[in-house]
Image (cartoon, rainbow, N blue to C red):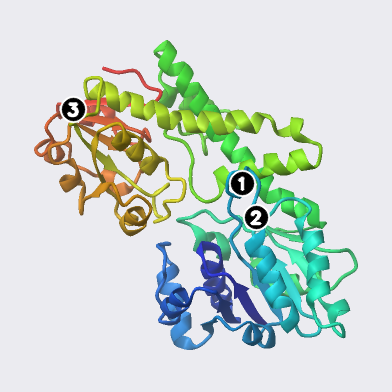
Amino acid sequence: MRITVIGTGYLGATHAACMAELGYEVLGLDIDPEKIATLSQGLTPMYEPGLDTLLAKHVESGRLRFTSDWAEVGAFGDVHFACTNTPQRKGEFACDMSYVESAFDLLAPHLRENALVVGKSTVPVGSAARLAERLAAGAPAEIAASVELAWNPEFLREGYAVQDTLRPDRLVAGVRAGGRAEAVLRELYAPLIDAGVPFLVTDYPTAELVKTAANSFLATKISFINAMAEVCEASGADVVQLSAALAYDDRIGGRFLNAGLGFGGGCLPKDIRAFMARAGELGADQALTFLREVDSINMRRRSRMVELAREQCGGGFLGRRIAVLGAAFKPNSDDVRDSPALNVAAQIQLQGGQVTVYDPKAMDNARKLFPGLSFADSALEAATGARVVLHLTEWQEFRDLDPDALGAVVSDRRILDGRNALDPHTWRSAGWTYRALGRPGE
């Protein structure tokens, strides 16, 4: 069985390398010639732990190749994974399906008999049925009836994408009843299924909803504890202690219950907004009105961090130097899409602050997105002369910082912990004013 992967972003590049690791011959396609050239050298165009080693290994062996030729893809593959992006539509909450639709339209004429196309992108519920019709209409007439579509949503966490592909917590296959797609996917994923990974078979809409429902639940849990942080700030309570106490309840659990600056990235924010938009189209908008408040709470945390920074600067940013530690939306990634850290940095700069940003992996992407910000090559360089230091992405490098070494270069020992990841006692013992979201001051 030979596999193609259409789209080589975070999802596609990881899926291609991992399918090669499972023993398949894989051909990846992308319309970006620079990305194809990079991948063909065994190099990753993004930072994802473990992916560089896996990619280089299988490009060198010849098991993994890349192209921009749709005809080559159609002739090569028995199973075609569609891993294209589904961003938020400009000026709307709804999902932009143009990349997925274009990929299906370009692939369809080149399909062979009995080809299986597998959608992995996060799409609005109802998309798969429509795309199946689109695929059949675009395929050669003589083989159209033999072409099938399955929906196999991804559940990757950036920073753990390789692990989540090779050792997923479940596999979901949305297929049409009576087709051969289920059998093909069971054969394809046999190494994972044999290792005990649950394989769940559903219809199209259920498979589509699994991913959006999961992301909505996670976003809700994150915003819940951040709402509690707002109450803690008003009452003088400590949200870290509150979270620890709640985590002992096994109905709640401690995962995703860490208060801080909130969520960002290319998935959760746009996915919950697209879910709300789709529910409105289906006439079920009232079912998801709570997600508007989830989104609102998340955005308020960014504004609150700006307010705290302003307080630490004596009521205004004009002429003040501010160090921002973190640019990626989360650690172990170079993804800066909808990054809370960069959003805060940009807000402070717009209000007159002299902001310098440092991140271990996301500097190039941050420079492209916010060329007006200043950037440094280390945490110490970023903090030099700073009135206040903002810790906004919880990289281990920042957890390991020496408060005395950092204190030697700042103008004032003031730190705001936007992720509740630093030890307050350690920093306060070194003479720092330590503040964090949802926690009382000194």
Going 81% across and 85% down the picture, which residue do you hit?
113
Q: Residue furthest top?
A: 235
Looking at the rendered structure, which numbered label has been put on residue 432?
A: 3
Q: Earlier in the sequence, mark 2 or mark 3?
A: 2
Q: Amino acid at mark 2?
A: Thr
Picture residue at 63% right of the left edge, 63% below the top: 99
| Left or right: 59, with 154 as reference point | left
Q: Is residue 264 shown left or right of residue 398? A: right
Q: Report, in whole angstroms, how far the alpha carbon at label 3 lies from the one at label 1.
A: 39 Å
Element carrying mark 2 = loop
Q: Circle 3: is it few (<14), some (14-19), or many (20+) Cα within 10 Å?
A: some
Which image quadrant: the C terminus? Answer: top left
Residue at image coords 43%, 86%: 60
Q: Are marks 2 and 3 in contact (CB under 8 Å)?
A: no
Neighbour tally class for label 2: few under 14, some 14-19, many 20 plus, Cα within 10 Å: many
Q: Which residue type carries mark 3? A: Trp
| Residue occupying the point 33% across, 47% down | 395
Camera-side mark, 3 or 1 = 1
Q: Amino acid at mark 1?
A: Asp
